[in-house]
Image (cartoon, rainbow, N blue to C red):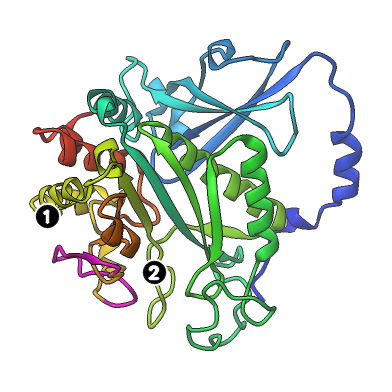
Amino acid sequence: MAAVSPSSHLSKAVRQQYMSLPQGETCQVTYVWIDGTGEGLRSKTRTLYSEPKSIEDIPEWNFDGSSTYQAEGSNSDMYLIPVCMFKDPFTLDPNKLVFCEVLKYNRLPAETNHRLSCSKVMEAVKEHCIWFGMEQEYTLLGVDGHPFGWPTNGYPAPQGPYYCGVGANNAYGRDIVECHYKACLYAGVKIYGTNAEVMPSQWEFQVGPCEGIEMGDHLWVARYLLHRVCEDFGVVATLDPKPMVGNWCGAGCHTNVSTKEMREKGGLQYIEQAIEKLSKKHAEHIRVYDPHGGKDNIRRLTGLHETSSIEDFSAGVANRGASIRIPRQVGQEKRGYFEDRRPAANCDPYTVTRSIAATCLLDTDEGENSK
């Protein structure tokens, strides 16, 4: 059994004694942001003396960017700009979680703040009412880095019984998954569903459908909630695209895309047009589908384990080995959506959705290059 963190053994009954204390008219607001790695999330909490009713009621704040890989110590203050608000499932309503953009000292976006450029693209294509749904795969690890539930020495039985599996010999960590699901629902995250994945201790949750910029906001907050729930259980959720070498599935963030034209009668022609445009920019998309320019995804997109090769672009109906999959029902009804299977589990949803929207709906490279 994988090792769990010491903090998970602290008395939850004692904690609850304090958490149940009344707090009067005050409100705890936890600010959440993306750090300088482009993958990690940070948070800190302050008191407001009345409950905020909208994002406009949340003041800007700041933090020490030299401690988050985002600034030098000699000029370290970074700005936190609140952009969306959720209920806090850990300290409960009226307390809030607030997701924030990060600006540098000169109030330009931090290097890992891709939300601003994404928002510009989504504004430019808003007439198309573009919807996204993202399927976030992740793997549960002990704090020692060993997959949760795997034998201390050796490996579990080969893949086969674990996908959507039931039973103690097939499903590892369901308590965490169900707590995360409830936390998302309470917070107001648009979580769509969840299931066990092909590799044991690997799971998936889906967020969406979300329109435009909302997709990135809700997925990032869902990730924050996942890490916090895992913290309570003393385990780690990794978004590594290939956490275990060998004959084990990797982890992706399949992205489902639909415009108003695609959803209407005869929409398949617009899906095919979008796929044709994507085929011409395969290399550009691979570069933004993980935080390290494709270096993470190359371990996952091998052409094996329900993936396409990172070198090739392909599309097909009901084909999980293709870059782009058209669901069978969409092929039959001639309208609906398509699924881009290339994004890695640790992708930034802002760069993914920005690039897809720009390639499919704009005649510029704004999706890949704007900042």
User: Residue 53: image x %, image y %?
Assistant: 63, 14
| Residue toward you, 165 or 229 | 165
* Rendered image: mark on residue 279: 1
**Is the Cβ of the residue at disc 1 closer than 8 Å to that at disc 2?**
no
Using the numbered discs, state the Cα–Cα distance from disc 1 to disc 2 in whole angstroms. Answer: 23 Å
Query: Is residue 118 one of those drawn in magenta?
Result: no
- The dot on residue 250 is 2
Looking at the image, residue 263 lies above or below residue 103:
below
**Relative to residue 163, is residue 47 depicted above or below?**
above
Say what secondary structure mark 2 lies in.
loop
- Which residues are drawn in magenta? 304-318
Side (left or right) of 322 relative to 239: left
Q: Residue at x 27, y 70 (%)?
A: 319
Type of residue at label 2? Gly
Mark whose residue sits in front, 1 or 2: 1
Using the rendered view, name the quadrant where residue 242 is placed. Answer: bottom left
Q: Does residue 69 appear anywhere in the picture?
A: no
Q: How far from the left and from the top, in percent, is residue 7?
A: 74, 53
Quadrant in which the N terminus appears: bottom right
Amino acid residing under circle 1: Ser
Question: Residue 161's x, y, as percent?
Answer: 54, 83
Main SS, magenta residues:
loop
Q: Nearer the viewer, residue 297 or 211?
A: 211
Q: Return the x and y of residue 354 as percentages of the image width and height.
A: 26, 37
Residue visible at 48% across and 46% down in the picture = 207
Work out whether residue 275 or residue 35 is closer to the camera in this orientation and state it: 275
